[in-house]
Image (cartoon, helix red, strand yellow):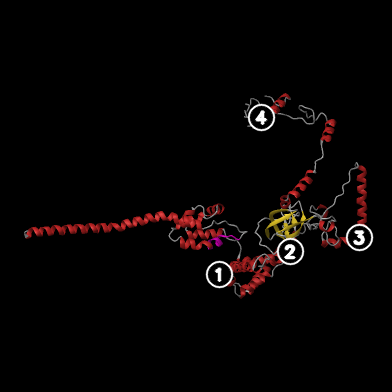
């Protein structure tokens, strides 16, 4: 093989190597672009899964101020979820996730609050601040500190729960920010408990709250100076008001103020519509204890004269009117002291503990005395949000409800008893659960019958036969002037739809009215 041929072969081989190298370089340049596209596609696929996983971990927020459920308390629990676990989400995705975990009522209030802007146009941090402003407790710092100093441990609360509650209230009240002047000012205002100092107390609380928001502290002497300034302004105002009164004294007559003996209102006792008050001093009704001594000091002759006058008036009215059946009326203002009737009690086994209940068919629930509950070992109580009122419409204190196993009259059932400081009382809920007691209760109710009115109807028909006659009646006591418009086009009205079952009765009634000339077809 000659050298020229070998040289040409080497040149061709080198060219092929160069082409292969350039092709490999192009392939390597395109590879990162394909990898980035795959990553983007993977992110697009995994982002919805991340939001779904985070949504399952977060509970819905329901604003309930009575249960101490505020937005700050809820967000502090899931703050790390939004800041760390949802780090790869965008700002708008975090806002959507947060709004998704609001209940419908809360979201509607927030949506109306941010109008005209849309919820999606607001950033995450601004959304959180707006929700804290709307759905946090609207109490001032002074009120929180006042509640903190009034904390008490309940009997049904263990020491661990009580410790946590004290710690939480102290942090809310920011006790650590109080210096000696702050504590002095708080104690100074706490001592103003008189009703006459309510206006001063309200003004000083507003000053403390304003200075705290401005980042300034108030000393005890500054608080006293504010109090003196307020008293000076009030005295000046009273002087101005007093001069106005002297000018108008010639034309305005001072009205004599009266006070009701029964309720203390601004009217006479004979005009009082309240329930008669039971006086604990003289054990009579009709006046309060503070006026009892005044009534006792009145002259007995005047009282006897008034009594004789009232008795004579009754006799005159009795002779004028026809004799009627006398009914003795008893006003039960304090039945526990005045009534002398035996009470009905029922013995039952509650959680294998014998309890004596007072039978009350007018009560919907069963009450368990607090001391009896403690003798049973103070079992755990469930929280309840029902409001219990007595027969006087007054609220009754309820510690909680207890799930009980009851054995009553040989029958075992289950039910709830509400623990209260008052007497143990069995209500309709437990009574109806016992077949024996339910049977006797229904028998007593069935014995109550209405008086027959047949005799009264027959007597009325005999006395006024023309009223009960068939046909149209006629009133001749009044005259009616009907003014009809001329050339008026009659209005057509469709008949109302009637159920098929009542169609026959309706047609019969219409035919009867047509025959009596009440209506015309």
Element on which disc 3 rests: loop
Tag 4 residue? 503
> Does 70 appear in magenta?
yes
Q: Earlier in the sequence, mark 2 or mark 1?
A: 1
Question: Would residue 242 appear left or right of 74 to someone viewing this image?
Answer: right
Q: Classify 10 Å Cα crowding around label 3: few (below 14), some (14-19), many (20 and above).
A: few
Mark 4 or mark 3, whichever is nearer to me: 4
Element on which disc 2 rests: helix
> Residue 398 location, x and y as percent?
70, 59
Q: Classify 10 Å Cα crowding around label 2: few (below 14), some (14-19), many (20 and above).
A: some
Name the foreground residue: 372 vs 419: 372
Q: Earlier in the sequence, mark 2 or mark 4?
A: 2
Q: Earlier in the sequence, mark 4 or mark 1?
A: 1
**Magenta part of the chain:** 68-76
Tag 3 residue? 299
Element on which disc 4 rests: helix
Q: CA distance from mark 4 to mark 3?
A: 77 Å
Above or below — where is 152 with respect to 278? below
Mark 4 or mark 1, whichever is nearer to me: 4
Element on which disc 1 rests: loop
Label pair 4/3, CB-CB below 8 angstroms: no
Q: Quadrant of residue 50?
A: bottom left
Q: Quadrant of residue 297?
A: bottom right
Outermost front residue:
410
- The quarter of the picture where the C terminus appears is top right
Query: Which residue shows up at 51% across the image and 61% down it?
Result: 78
Question: Could you tell me how many numbered marks the image carries?
Answer: 4
Secondary structure predominantly adopted by residues drawn in magenta = helix
Q: CA distance from mark 2 to mark 4?
A: 65 Å
> Residue 42 location, x and y as percent?
38, 55
């Amino acid at each position: 093989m000659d050298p020229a041929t070998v040289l040409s072969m080497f040149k061709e081989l080198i060219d092929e190597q160069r082409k292969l190298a350039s092709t490999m370089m192009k392939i390597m340049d395109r590879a990162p672009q394909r990898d980035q596209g795959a990553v983007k596609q993977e992110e697009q696929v995994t982002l919805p899964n991340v939001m779904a996983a985070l949504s399952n971990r977060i509970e819905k927020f329901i604003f309930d101020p009575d249960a101490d459920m505020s937005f700050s308390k809820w967000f502090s629990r899931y703050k790390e979820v939004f800041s760390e676990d949802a780090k790869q989400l965008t700002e708008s995705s975090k806002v959507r996730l947060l709004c998704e975990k609001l209940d419908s009522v809360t979201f509607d209030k927030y949506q109306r609050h941010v109008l005209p802007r849309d919820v999606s146009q607001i950033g995450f941090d601004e959304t959180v601040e707006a929700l804290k402003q709307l759905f946090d407790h609207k109490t001032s710092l002074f009120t929180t500190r006042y509640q903190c100093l009034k904390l008490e441990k309940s009997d049904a609360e263990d020491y661990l729960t009580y410790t946590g509650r004290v710690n939480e209230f102290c942090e809310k009240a920011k006790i650590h920010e109080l210096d000696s002047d702050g504590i002095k000012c708080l104690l100074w205002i706490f001592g103003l408990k008189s009703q006459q100092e309510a206006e001063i107390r309200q003004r000083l609380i507003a000053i403390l709250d304003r200075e705290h928001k401005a980042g300034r502290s108030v000393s005890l002497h500054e608080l006293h100076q504010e109090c003196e300034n307020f008293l000076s302004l009030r005295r000046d105002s009273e002087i101005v008001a007093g001069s106005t009164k002297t000018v108008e004294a010639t034309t305005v007559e001072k009205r004599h103020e009266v006070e009701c003996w029964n309720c203390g209102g601004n009217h006479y006792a004979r005009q009082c519509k309240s329930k008669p008050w039971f006086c604990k001093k003289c054990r009579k009704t009709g006046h309060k204890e503070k006026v009892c001594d005044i009534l006792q000091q009145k002259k007995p002759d005047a009282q006897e004269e008034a009594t004789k006058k009232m008795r004579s008036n009754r006799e005159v009215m009795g002779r004028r009117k026809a004799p009627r059946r006398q009914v003795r009326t008893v006003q039960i203002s304090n039945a526990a002291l005045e009534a002398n009737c035996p009470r009905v009690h029922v013995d039952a086994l509650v959680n294998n503990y014998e309890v004596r209940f007072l039978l009350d068919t007018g009560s919907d629930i069963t009450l368990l005395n607090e001391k009896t509950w403690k003798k049973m070992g103070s079992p755990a109580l469930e929280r309840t949000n029902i409001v219990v009122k007595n027969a006087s419409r007054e609220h009754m204190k309820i510690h909680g409800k207890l799930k009980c196993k009851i054995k009553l009259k040989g029958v075992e059932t289950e039910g709830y008893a509400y623990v209260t400081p008052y007497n143990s009382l069995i209500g309709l809920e437990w009574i109806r659960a016992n077949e024996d007691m339910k049977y006797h209760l229904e028998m007593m109710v069935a014995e109550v019958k209405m008086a027959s009115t047949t005799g009264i109807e027959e007597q009325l028909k005999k006395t006024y036969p023309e009223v009960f006659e068939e046909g149209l009646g006629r009133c001749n006591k009044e005259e009616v002037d009907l003014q009809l418009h001329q050339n008026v086009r009659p209005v057509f009205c469709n008949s109302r739809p009637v159920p098929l079952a009542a169609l026959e009765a309706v047609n019969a009634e219409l035919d009867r009215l047509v025959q009596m000339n009440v209506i015309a077809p």
